[in-house]
Image: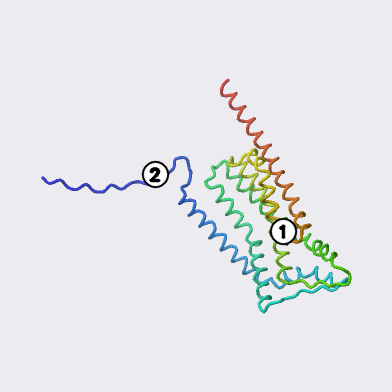
Amino acid sequence: MSEQPALPSKKKTRKNTDGRMTLAEHLLELRKRLFIAAIAIVVGMILGFVVSNYAIELMSEPIRQLADSKLANLNFDTVTSGFDLHMKVALTLGFVVSAPVWLYQIWAFLVPGLRRTEVKYILGFILTAIPLFFAGCFAGWTVMPHIVELMANFTPEDASNLYQAGYYYDFILKLVLAVGIAFVLPVFLVLLNFVGVLSAKAIIKGWRIALLVIMLFCAIATPAADVISMFLLAIPMIVLYFAAYLVSFLNDRRRAKKAAKNESEYQS
């Protein structure tokens, strides 16, 4: 009898028993999260374009206030400057309006597969990060006219302020978004600590690098020549960073005491 050729056996895909994701799964997860966030931003951008005229009027208010005391005007120096401005404002408003969606997508990507006992941290993230982002945007918007007025006071008495429109509005949009993001970053640190991903020791160990990153971030978010606004943004970010460390330290100490208590009860 002739032996029949053995059929190729189907190899079963082995799954990680420890719940870890492979590199391919991480990339697929990242693509999924980015796609959802992009859709939310585009929808928000469309809504932002509808109200961009009103937003531009509000951002131009400090210039009108300066015009009462000295000559101040905005200069659109290219043919497409007006349209570019509306698109920039619409994109920024899209980021702000869609913040609940893309903030959650970031959190879901960083901490996938939470256990049932840890799902409560998602609610904690939503109830803290999203309001803090909007509060940060509002704080940046509130301080913006004072920064514009402060910088204008350095202009000599016999000179006038002719601002380039693109530069002026970029400054406002970057400032508002930067302060909003700055208010949220400590929440990520605290929640990563609460789910056991990041310890308080790890947070404080890199404080020098964190300060350098904060300063670089503030330098990018504010105009290079505006050192004052850079420090106005850096100081609360530094305070919030160390506040995140303090909360994480207290949580680690509480967790260590609970573990020691459980161990002593088990031994007894």
* Circle 2 residues within 10 Å: few <14, some 14–19, many ≥20: few
Q: Residue at x 84, y 64 (%)?
A: 154
Secondary structure of the residue carrying tag 2 is: loop
Which sits in the foreground, 245 or 17?
245
| Image coords of residue 216 (percent x, y) | 68, 54
Residue flagged by tag 2: what amino acid is it? Arg
N-terminal label among 1 and 2: 2
> x%, y% of residue 166?
70, 70
Q: CA distance from mark 1 to mark 2?
A: 46 Å
Query: In this view of the protein, which residue sits in the foreground, 210 or 20?
Result: 210
Label 1 CA crowd tier, 10 Å (few <14, some 14–19, many 20+): many
Residue 34, quarter of picture = bottom right
Q: Residue at x 79, y 59 (%)?
A: 143
Q: Quadrant of the N terminus?
A: top left
The answer to whether residue 201 is above or below residue 170 is above
Q: Secondary structure at mark 1?
A: helix
Q: Which mark is residue 14?
A: 2
Q: Residue placed at 46% from the left, 47% from the top?
A: 22
Q: Which mark is residue 118?
A: none
Residue at image mark 1: 137
Q: Nearer the viewer, residue 76 or 191?
A: 76
- Residue 139 point in image, percent of width and height: 75, 57
Q: Quadrant of the C terminus?
A: top right
Residue type at numbered disc 1? Cys
Is 117 on the left or on the right of 250, as rendered?
Answer: left
Residue placed farthest to the left in the image? 1
Q: Is residue 25 left or right of residue 107?
A: left
Residue shown at the point (62%, 41%) measured from the top left? 193
Tally the numbered discs. 2
Q: Residue furthest top?
A: 268
| 43, above or below 120, in the image | below
